């Protein structure tokens, strides 16, 4: 089974107002292997909804879609494991939570955010949606 932690940047491109990555984000989700598990830290759900609200877009339907994925809460169990991955403190809190979720779930982080990807690679495998699709067997 493929396990992915998908960053809010991919969802905002998919569900938000059209941007450079909208088509690629749609292609990514449309071409994922059937056995893919998508894991979302609760913060990704929150960031996605906040960004869509800033674009003055409705969030209820997107929220319902995001709830179909595996949601990882920011609870005491997660935070104790997270604390052990703090490193040098150079990553933004949200980005570190997302990367730690990938590491703790033996998953690949998927994001369009180049800064996030470069720093996350010290913690977990981190790829753009295009990079991921180019490496995975789509059959």
Image (cartoon, rainbow, N blue to C red):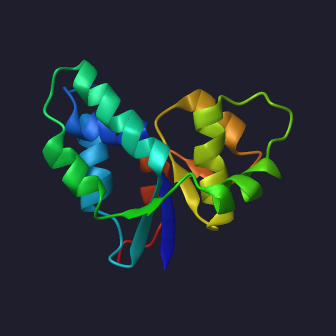
Placement of 32 over or under 13, stated as above or below? below
Give the percent coordinates (x, y) of residue 6: 45, 51
Placement of 112 over or under 136, stated as above or below? above
Give the percent coordinates (x, y) of residue 80: 75, 56
Quadrant (top left, top right, bottom left, bottom right) of the C terminus: bottom left
Residue in the image at 61% along x and 28% along y: 115
Tell me the quarter of the picture where residue 66 sits: bottom left
Give the percent coordinates (x, y) of residue 86: 80, 42
Q: Nearer the viewer, residue 76 or 78?
A: 76
Task: Give left or right: position of 68 versus 107.
Answer: left
Q: Nearer the viewer, residue 63 or 130?
A: 63
Placement of 2 over or under 18, stated as above or below? below
Task: Give left or right: position of 115 versus 66.
Answer: right
Tell me the quarter of the picture where residue 59 sits: top left
Task: Give left or right: position of 21 versus 6.
Answer: left
Task: Give left or right: position of 27 versus 114.
Answer: left
**Residue sitting at the far front:** 76
Give the percent coordinates (x, y) of residue 48: 34, 37
**Residue sitting at the far right:** 88
Q: Is residue 100 visible?
A: yes
Residue in the image at 56% along x and 51% along y: 74
Residue in the image at 77% along x and 45% along y: 122
Residue in the image at 62% along x and 44% along y: 97
């Amino acid at each position: 089974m493929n396990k992915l932690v998908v960053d809010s940047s991919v969802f905002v491109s998919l569900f938000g107002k059209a941007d450079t990555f909208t088509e690629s984000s749609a292609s990514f989700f449309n071409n994922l292997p059937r056995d893919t598990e998508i894991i979302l830290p609760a913060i990704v759900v929150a960031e996605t909804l906040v960004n869509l609200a800033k674009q003055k877009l409705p969030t209820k339907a997107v929220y319902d879609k995001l709830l179909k994925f595996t949601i990882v809460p920011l609870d005491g169990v997660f935070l104790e494991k997270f604390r052990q991955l703090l490193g040098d403190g150079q990553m933004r809190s949200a980005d570190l939570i997302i990367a730690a979720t990938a590491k703790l779930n033996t998953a690949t982080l998927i994001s369009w955010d180049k800064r996030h990807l470069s720093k996350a690679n010290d913690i977990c495998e981190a790829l753009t949606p295009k990079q991921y699709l180019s490496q995975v067997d789509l059959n």
